[in-house]
């Protein structure tokens, strides 16, 4: 027991704590996910977030201390996202033939995702800064943070909304698709990539390679379209009513 305490004291005071805790918790979460038959509600990312959050609270560890080690994993997110381009390259001929419909679907999906969130928030009387933080919720968290601040939102809150959106999509998409009778993997993948960005795409890859490829395409299209169009549309449609 004394050896364990000494190890804990050493890890908690060094960057190894964040790295070790993240890897250990995620490996355990994936093992539980596989043991439960890949049940959507046992999503490894969700379980890891809950366990790591509880660990930080119970151990009274400051987030900067944790992130000093976890940043090594955070750095790998960039190469991981770039690697998603490979399956798109393999399907380039198929995607080229469907370019028009896919672009139209991405545009419609992005407008619905942002418009429904902001519209519901406006009906509920949420303050303008929260509405601006909600608008980019369906793009990956770093992009959502970058878009929220120029719109008058809060970057940290935008990141929370983006992560929650991804988790909800990863958990609820399969039962919803089954209920609606949508079975083609490319349709499932494109839909979840449009609404639930990277976390949804990761879930799509676990189900079917075609679903993963189309989810990756939808993710990239949403980042591009949202970055270009959201600032213009938000200031034109929402900002005047939010700031009378």
Image (tube, rainbow, N blue to C red):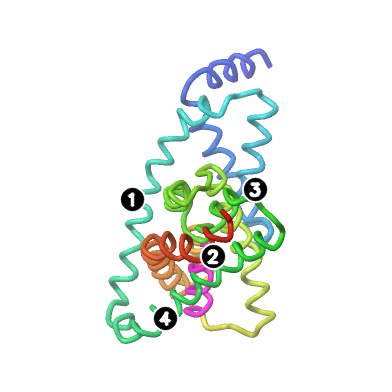
For the residue pair 99 and 69, the one nearer the viewer reads as 99
Mark in the foreground, 3 or 2? 2
The first of marks 4 and 3 along the sequence is: 3
Q: Position of residue 25 (x, y in %)?
A: 59, 40
Residue shown at 47% from the left, 79% from the top:
186
Residue 192 coordinates in the image, percent (x, y): 53, 69
Secondary structure under the numbered disc 4 in the rendered image: helix
Label 3 and label 2: CA atoms lie apart by 27 Å
Left or right: 21, with 124 as reference point: left
Local SS, label 1: helix
- Of callouts 2 and 1, which one flags the residue occurring earlier in the amino acid sequence? 1
Marks 2 and 4: in contact by CB < 8 Å?
no
* Residue range (magenta): 185-196
Between discs 1 and 3, the one toward the N terminus: 3
Q: CA distance from mark 2 to mark 1?
A: 27 Å
Give the residue at mark 4.
104
Residue 79 shows which numbered tag? 1
Q: Residue 157: which quarter of the image?
A: top right
Residue designated by label 3? 47
In percent of the image, x 52 and y 24: which residue is there?
Answer: 65
Q: Nearer the viewer, residue 222 or 50?
A: 222
Earlier-in-chain disc, 3 versus 2: 3
Query: Are the two marked residues, 4 and 3, in contact with CB atoms closer than 8 angstroms?
Result: no
CB under 8 Å between callouts 2 and 1? no
């Amino acid at each position: 027991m004394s050896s364990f305490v000494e190890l804990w004291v050493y890890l908690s005071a060094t960057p190894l704590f964040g790295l070790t805790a993240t890897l250990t918790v995620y490996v355990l979460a994936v093992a539980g996910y596989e043991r439960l038959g890949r049940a959507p509600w046992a999503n490894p990312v969700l379980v890891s977030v809950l366990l790591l959050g509880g660990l930080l609270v119970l151990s009274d560890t400051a987030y900067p201390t944790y992130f000093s080690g976890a940043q090594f994993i955070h750095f790998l997110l960039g190469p991981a996202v770039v690697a998603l381009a490979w399956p798109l390259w393999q399907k380039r001929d198929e995607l080229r033939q469907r370019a028009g419909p896919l672009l139209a679907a991405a545009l419609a999906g992005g407008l619905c995702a942002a418009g429904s969130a902001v519209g519901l928030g406006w009906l509920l009387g949420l303050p303008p800064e929260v509405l601006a933080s909600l608008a980019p919720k369906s793009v990956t968290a770093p992009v959502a943070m970058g878009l929220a601040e120029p719109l008058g939102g809060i970057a940290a809150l935008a990141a929370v909304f983006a992560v929650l959106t991804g988790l909800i999509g990863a958990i609820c998409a399969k039962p919803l698709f089954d209920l609606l009778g949508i079975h083609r993997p490319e349709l499932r993948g494109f839909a979840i990539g449009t609404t639930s960005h990277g976390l949804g795409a990761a879930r799509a890859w676990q189900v079917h390679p075609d679903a993963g490829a189309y989810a990756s395409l939808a993710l990239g299209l949403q980042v591009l379209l949202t970055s270009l169009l959201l600032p213009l549309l938000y200031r034109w449609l929402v900002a005047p009513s939010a700031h009378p």
